[in-house]
Image: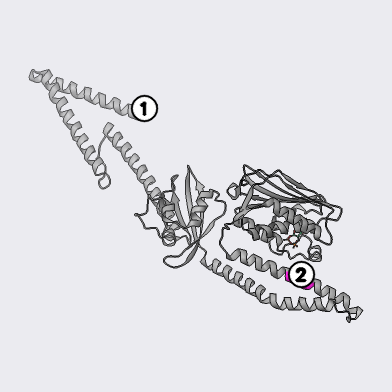
């Protein structure tokens, strides 16, 4: 970079001034008979002036925030003006930065949610007031500590372990008073993370009230329904019943059966929701279970002609038997319900590096793509009339989803109208145990 012209000019003038002063000194010295002495005296005076300027500049630099810059001309004037300009610019940027920081701090402090900034080691770098309140973090003292050492709830530890932060996790804190917190990690920058915390106690309490209400209502409905269904059964088999009542009584029995199925499924759902989030369990012989499910399908008054079982692995699944059976039975029951008599159903169990998988495929009516994301919602039916006619409660897939969630699994649905459906339950590898000792040959059963 070339020096600016003004600076070069100032330097040129300064050199001229030195030369002029030396000349004047030489002339004065000549008059006194000592030209060198004259030059030396004038240059010494010049040097003294420069030293004074240097001293004033140094003093001003030390006190520049309170003092005005010294008056100077020539090179000194240019240098001081440049320094003053740099100083002003720096002060402007600093002020803007401080203002920005203050605004940022004020806005995050005013947030109704907690925010914690974590570094790549998950150590706390900063947190707002709400995070302090919700998570019990102490200002200054807890900075630099790892978040998992301060938020020690098992659900949070599990969330961190899973390393899938797409959805928040709800944790229950019991001290100082019971609150429910929704916690979510958001990655940003170079490995840093934001931990967002919100108090969801109100929603959780409302949810608990709703759950209790559904459970109590279903429970209360069960006994009167049993009585009604019992009397209808007796009436239906009464030889003295007038012929014209046979059809209405038959319809009433079907509706009572539907209501019983709904109440049963509602109770099952409430039970699943009320117990522990994670189900433990025992090793289950999936192959054996599938063989029994096949028998159940064949025992139905109407069933698809072909019902195949392909148990490709003898590995067991760790789970709660009643829940797993209920989930698998719901899927198989749907396949049987929505597949015509000339169609086929196949149940398959296999294990690979990603875990265990149970799939039910059918050649039935299939489901249009727009319905797939909503299938596991309670009471969601593609064709309500058809579902009711088949005695469906509309809760089967909601139960399946819940059971799988409690076993760390997930449900995958592939279907196309007229081409049949495949519902696959995926279980993580930690839920799979290799077969005890003897390797059982893969079992295939055909109807
Ligand atoms: P339902 O008791 O009505 O069968 P589910 O929750 O088990 O309720 O299923 C929800 C809806 O998904 C059903 O009403 C039906 O429309 C659709 N469905 C489920 N399984 C199948 C299948 N194998 N083939 C076609 N449609 C299905």
Magenta part of the chain: 255-260
Q: Nearer the viewer, residue 178 or 63?
A: 178
Q: Nearer the viewer, residue 60 or 159?
A: 159
In the image, residue 61 lies in the stretch drawn in magenta: no
**Which circle marks residue 3 in the picture?**
1
Ligand 1, what quadrant?
A: bottom right
Q: Is residue 425 visible?
A: yes
Q: Is residue 167 above or below residue 14?
A: below
Left or right relative to 145: residue 22: left
State which tag comes first along the sequence, 2 or 1.
Answer: 1
Quadrant housing residue 135: bottom left
Residue at 61% of width from left, 47% of height from top? Answer: 436
Residue at 24% of width from left, 44% of height from top? Answer: 63
Labels 2 & 1 near each other (Cβ < 8 A): no
Q: Is residue 1 above or below residue 285?
A: above
Separation of marks 2 and 1 at Cα, in angstroms: 93 Å
Position of the N terminus, as image quadrant, is top left
In the image, residue 256 lies in the stretch drawn in magenta: yes
Q: Is residue 130 above or below residue 441?
A: below
Disc 2, SS: helix
Residue at 84% of width from left, 52% of height from top? Answer: 343
Which residue is tagged 2?
A: 258
Q: Residues within 10 Å of mark 2 (few under 14, many from 20)?
A: some
Image coordinates of residue 253 in percent, x first then y, are: 81, 73
Image coordinates of residue 256 in percent, x first then y, are: 77, 73
Residue at 55% of width from left, 49% of height from top? Answer: 164
Q: Nearer the viewer, residue 397 or 25?
A: 397
């Amino acid at each position: 970079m070339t020096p600016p012209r003004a600076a070069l000019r100032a330097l040129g003038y300064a050199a001229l001034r030195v030369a002029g002063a030396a000349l004047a000194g030489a002339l004065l010295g000549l008059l006194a008979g000592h030209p060198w002495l004259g030059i030396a005296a004038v240059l010494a005076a010049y040097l003294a002036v420069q030293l004074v300027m240097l001293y004033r500049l140094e003093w001003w630099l030390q006190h520049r925030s309170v003092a005005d810059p010294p008056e100077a001309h020539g090179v000194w004037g240019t240098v001081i003006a440049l320094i003053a300009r740099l100083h002003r610019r720096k002060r402007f940027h600093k002020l803007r930065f401080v203002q920005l920081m203050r605004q940022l701090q004020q806005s995050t402090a005013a947030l109704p949610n907690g925010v914690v900034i974590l570094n790549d080691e998950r150590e706390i770098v900063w947190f707002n007031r709400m995070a302090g309140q919700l998570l019990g973090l102490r200002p200054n003292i807890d900075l630099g500590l790892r978040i998992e050492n301060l938020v020690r709830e098992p659900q949070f530890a599990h969330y961190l372990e899973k390393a899938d932060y797409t959805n928040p996790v709800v944790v229950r804190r019991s001290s100082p008073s019971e609150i429910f917190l929704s916690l979510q990690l958001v990655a940003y920058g170079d490995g840093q993370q934001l931990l967002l915390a919100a108090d969801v106690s109100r929603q959780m309490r409302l949810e608990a009230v709703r759950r209790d209400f559904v459970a109590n209502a279903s429970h209360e409905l069960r006994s009167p329904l049993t009585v009604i269904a019992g009397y209808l059964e007796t009436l239906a088999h009464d030889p003295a019943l007038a012929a014209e009542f046979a059809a209405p009584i038959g319809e009433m029995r079907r509706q009572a059966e539907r209501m019983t199925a709904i109440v049963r499924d509602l109770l099952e759902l409430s039970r699943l929701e009320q117990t522990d989030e994670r189900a433990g369990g025992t090793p289950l012989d999936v192959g054996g279970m599938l063989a029994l499910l096949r028998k159940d399908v064949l025992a139905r008054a109407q069933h698809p002609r072909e019902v195949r079982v392909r148990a490709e692995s003898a590995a067991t699944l760790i789970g709660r038997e009643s829940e797993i059976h209920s989930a698998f039975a719901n899927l198989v029951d749907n396949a049987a319900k929505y597949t015509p008599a000339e169609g086929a159903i196949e149940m398959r169990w296999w294990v690979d590096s990603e875990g265990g998988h149970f799939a039910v495929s059918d050649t039935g009516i299939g489901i249009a793509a727009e319905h797939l994301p909503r299938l596991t919602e309670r009471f969601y039916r593609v064709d309500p009339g058809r579902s009711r006619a088949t005695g469906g409660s509309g809760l089967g897939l909601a139960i399946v989803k819940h059971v799988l969630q409690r076993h760390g699994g997930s449900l995958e649905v592939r279907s196309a109208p007229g081409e049949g459906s495949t519902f696959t339950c995926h279980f993580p590898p930690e839920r799979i145990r290799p077969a005890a000792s003897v390797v059982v040959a893969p079992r295939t059963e055909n109807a």
